[in-house]
Every structure is written in C-alpha cells, then in structure tokens.
Image (cartoon, grey):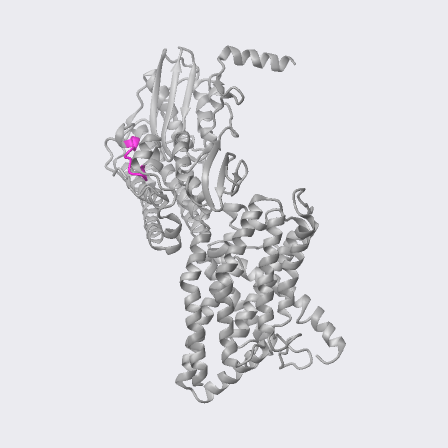
Amino acid sequence: MSEREFVIPVGPQHPALKEPESFLFTVDGEVVVDVEARIGYNHRGIEKAMESRNYIQNLYITERVCGICSNAHQTAYTGSVEEAGGIEIPERAKYIRVFVQELERLHSHLLWVGVAAHEIGFDTMFYLVWRDRELVMDLLEEISGNRVNYAMPTVGGVRRDLNKDNFMRYHKILDTVAERTNYYIKVASTEKTILERAVGVGYLGKEDMIRLSGCGPNARSSGVPCDIRKLSPYLIYDEIPFEHIYVDNGDVLGQVLVRVLETLEAVKICKWVLDNIPEGEIAVKFNPMQRLPEGEAAYLVEAQRGELIHYTISDGKNMPYRHKIRAPTMANIPSLIERLKGGYIADIPITLAGIDPCFSCTDRMVFYDEGKDKTWSWTEGELSKYRKEWYSK
Amino acid sequence: MSSPFTTLVAVLIFPGLSFILTYGLWCQWVSRKAAARLQNRQGPLHTGWQGILQPLADFIKLLVNEDITPAAADKPVFNYSPIAVFALPLAATFLIPIQSLTNLWGWDPIVSFEGDLILILFLMSVVILAVFLGGWSSGSLFGAVGATRAALMMLAYEIPLGLVAIGPAILAGSLQISKIVDWQVASVNAFFRAPSIQGLAVVGVLFIGVVIYVICLLAELELKPFDISEAETEIVHGWQVEYSGKKLALLNAGHDVKMVLAAALVTSLFLGGPAGPILPPFVWFILKTTFCVLVLTNLSVLFARFRIDQMVSGAWKYLVPLAVLQVMAVVALSGVI
C-alpha cells in the first residue's frame, strides 16, 4: 500500500448494505484500488438444522433462508425432495408454483429498482417504485395470506388454490404493473443524472463474467445467457412463451435493463398462467412422518438473484441426511469484487447493490488458520465432540 | 436603529436571532413536507398541526441526547466547528434587509455598509472551512472523505456563486445589499411606468443569473443532486458522521439558518428583497423566501446524486463560463441603461 492509499471499511454496519457483511476498500483518493470481502456475519446454521427435522418441518426453515426469495427457496427445496422421493405433483400445482414464483420475481425486481435508485441518491424514484410494488405485494397477500413468506409450495403440490373468479382482477393489476414498469424504463433510460451514474459504472465483460462464474441478472447484464428457466426448464417453463433476457452493457445500466425487462416478462408469464391454468387437484398427500427412499437429487431454480441450487441426500429416513443450498449471491461475489475495482467511492453502493446481494442466504463458515494459511472443515463426529465439550464446561 | 434598545431587540428577537431560528425551523418543515408530498409520502404528521412542530421537537430531542466526542478526534477543532457552522450564517443574516423596527414600511438591515455583499460571500466560504475542519478533525475516515468532498465542491461552485452575485451589484452600482434592493424597487417601478426593451433584457440576463445562483445554492446547502459531501448511502453522512447530541443539534440549526440565508440572498439580489405592495416588508420577505425554499426543495427531489468528479467538471465546464458570460452581458447592459 502506497502512502496515498488508505482503507475504508464498508460494513459490517453500513447504510449501503442492508445486511451485515464486510468489505474493506483500499482507496487512492476517490478511486478504489483493491477490495477484500469477508462473509460470515450472518451464519445461522440452517443446513445443519435441516438435518434434524422432517421434510414438512424443513419447509418452514427453507422459506426463512431469505426474505425476498422465500418462494424460490421453497420451490427448489420441494423440487429436490420430490425428485429424491419420486413424487409426481399435479399439473395445476405446477402452474400455481410458477405463478407465485413470477409474482415474487416481480416484487423483488421492483424492490431492487427502488433500492438502486436510493443508492444513487434518487429517493423520489425509490418511493414511487415501492408504491407500485405494493400492488404486487397486495396480490401476493390475497393469494397466500402473507406478504413475505408465502408458504405456498409444499412437498407434493401447493397449499392454497387460486380462485377463478378473481382472474380478471389479477389481469388488471398486472396490466397496471406493466404500465408503471414501462414508465420507469422510460425514466431510467432518459433521465440524465441516472445515466451519468449508471453508464460504464462497475463494468465487467462477458469473458470475465464467464471466468468468474456469475449467475442471474448479474451475469445476464454482461451478455451471458444463463437463465435456468430456459437452459434447464423446471415445472412448466418449457411450455411458457417468454424471452430470454440478456444485454451486453456489462455495467449498472445493463443490470437495470435486465431487471426491468424481466419484470415485463414476469408479467407476461403470470398472465399466460392465468389464461392456461388447468383444473384439478393442487397436491398429492405427503405424510410428515413419511420416509423417503434412499437417494439424492439436485434441483435448480432461477431465483430472482440467479441460479439457486438445492441438493438433498436421503438415507431412507423421514429427514434429510444432508441438504445443501447454494444461493446465487455466493456465486456473484467474485464478479462483484472485479466490478468494484477501479471505480469511485461514490459508485461503491450502486455496484454493491447491483448484484442484488442477499448475504443471509450466502453466509458459510470454514475454519481458517491465518498463521498457517490453511483451511479445514469438521465432520459430524468432530462437531458433536466439540458440542459435548462446550456444554460440559 | 436609533436607540441601543431597538438595536438589542433587533439583534436578539426580531429580525435577529429568535426570528431567524424560528423561521429556519419553519423552512425545514416546509422543505420536509413539500419533499414528502412530491415523493408520495406524508412527511411529519404528529407533532402539532401537520407536524409543524417536528423540527423543534427534533432539535430539543438532540439537545437531550448523549454528546459523544471520539477519542481520535482533535477535540478543540471538533468542538468549536459546529459553533462556527451555526454562527457564521446567522451573522450573515444580520446583513439581509428584512424589516425595520422603527418604521413599518422600512427594511433597513441590522448592520449595513458599503461592501456587505462581499462580507456575506466571505462568510459563506468560511462556513465551508468550518465544515472541512469539523469533518477532518473527527478522526473518522468517512468524516475525512466527506470533508475533502465538501472542500472540492466549494472549489467548483464558489466562483460562479460569487460572479453571479456581482451581477445585480454592477447594475445597482453598489455592493451594499439594501442599495441593491432599493435599485430593484426603483427600476421595477420605472419599468411599470414606462416599459422598455432594455428593462426586459435586464430581466432576461438576471434570470440566467438566478438559475446559476440557485444551482450553486443547491451545492452550498448540500441538497440532493449535490449532497455529495453527505451522501448517506456512500459515506454515511460524510463530515457529520461523528457528531451527536448538542453538536449535531447545532449543525442542524446551522443548516436551517443556511437555508434561510440562501433563500434570503436569492430574494434580496434577484426578487426585490422584502419590497412589495400592500403588505409590510417582513410578510413579503417570508412569502418570497418560502417560495425560494419550495423551489430548492422541488429541484432537490428531481435528480439523482452526482459523483464528485462529475459535479466539479460540470461546474467548470458549464457554470463558470455561463456565469462569466452573464457578468459580461450585465456589464454591457449597464452601459445601455
């Protein structure tokens, strides 16, 4: 570090971060030279907790991995369990899952647009976007009874049905959302102060993005077509006509564009589902004490923030032997660090927010000895021994 | 201002200390409420009618809060700079014509002398110096970055701000604010008696001036497109980050007084000061300055925040040349009329 450089800590507590996470920025004047990320402030031991609960109880845990993508986590979890157990769910349940998932994508992307506007100091847009997001939130509340954790998917189907009488009203609400989104696209692409803060900020090219294996809107903003809904369709996404959105801007403007265009696509998908949903059962019976046959399954879902992987191993009991969650933010952190380097201090918040980080999904723990520079992990037996020693003290 | 008693009343009560402070709280409420309504929010609601007492409540609450001085701070500088940030704009408001105590239709300022406009410009620059020292001495990195940004911003807006303020002074042939106001009143009266093309040209040129002036004031007041030195999401309120309790209350009051001063300067230099028909001067002063506060608020909710490099280069590329051109136009016009 030269004499002109100094270190600015952003986080664990910082207004630009909604969750605790630490980034140490080495800056030269106003220019960022180096970034050091440290995750692990929000570790809750969810994967471990899932190993001691049955498959129905785990529904409630997976839903609480993240507040914004609660439904994505549940969809991925139920998908992996159904695949491991060979459970076939009714056709109508698939449509309802897709409907709720796309509504969740709608509200999440609108939320992100508001947060991004706030990060560049455009509070007016933040308030207006969040006002319109309420339409989607109200719709979700009407369908599921909840504003955050919808508790819609369950192992074997979904828990609540959609009422056909309301479909016309849903169509109207979705039309309003699309209209407002079109207005925000107009504002974001013509307002001078937004363009000044978005064009060329946090640039990362396509090759670098592939090398750093980003995912979700973060990667699609750099021109990498990586939408799981297209690449490896799950539920009924192979039947739905929608466009694979990706742009090659590579900067914050690209991230805004990908998200607002996906918002419009999500509206289209929701309307298609309402038009084409078949009649029938919404769930097959799954007993909480039911044992799953031995086996393993991975299930990929395109959550709002990117590719979400749930991997479950069953050893024939009524609870998973191991359940592994790979949240999209985890995959996006390397590319985020590359985006931050060479930018200005003023661009840190918007670049950080650009990947739509969700650190509570991300946090992992490893043991690391700084002096010897080695990492290791503990087996179940070692952890159990540590626990016994700790509590016998 | 004949007797010592009226001078004392003028300095301490009206139109001095108490009035400016109360009026600052009013401006803060107007600004907050207008911004909130423009952003589809309610703004303050609960303290008093439509939350009108909220700024006062905030002030009192901050006075009660714990006052922390960081161990790493340079204590004397850290402690005294809020006082400077509060006192300097307050002193500058004494030079603004608001209302004479002895004559209901008069508007002599408390202090007035040839060249007081220069003193006001000087005081406004010294405020930034106090801001810089306060942020720098706080011992916090965010404070240091915010302070550097405040100083850099001053380099950008101070010159157009000063240049444009000279425009009315050239036309009035005086650097005394009350004489500039008198000139405006006289020429507006003359214009209504005998409208002329030169008069319209003066209005046009001064309009360019007032636009530049308002843009610079947005930066001076650290309002939205130029709140770079505070930038909550970037550097956590910048130079103010380590201040709490009484000192923060003083800083906030200082900001309110600065808002009053800015609105009062626009009013005095471009909008005819406290002069106006039928109503006494202080009522016109309140009406005009409140209008200025509303304009500033409206502008501040319209934009996203600029980056410091964009702001500085934009000011030097556009504002400074425009201000120079405007002064040249004013000089040319002053030869004509």
Asked if residue B297 can be seen in this view, the reply is: no
Main SS of the magenta part reads: loop
Residue closest to the far front: A3
Quadrant of the rendered image containing residue A212: top left
Asked if residue A151 can be seen in this view, the reply is: yes
Q: Report the magenta residues as a range.
A: A220-229
Residue B271 at what x, y percent from top left? 51, 75
Which image quarter holds the C terminus of chain A? top right
Is residue B176 or residue B45 the one in the foreground?
B176
Is B35 situated left or right of A304 in this image?
Answer: right
Is residue A184 or residue B304 the one in the foreground?
B304
Residue lying at 41% horizontally and 68% vertically, measured from the top left: B322
Residue A108 at what x, y percent from top left? 40, 39
Residue lying at 49% horizontally and 75% vertically, measured from the top left: B167
Quadrant of the rendered image containing residue B88: bottom right
Q: Is residue A224 magenta?
A: yes
Report the number of numbered marks.
Answer: 0
Q: Is residue A128 above or below residue A142?
A: below
Residue A65 at what x, y percent from top left? 46, 29
Residue lying at 53% horizontally and 65% vertically, measured from the top left: B293
Q: Is residue B292 magenta?
A: no
Q: Is residue A307 above or below residue B101?
A: above
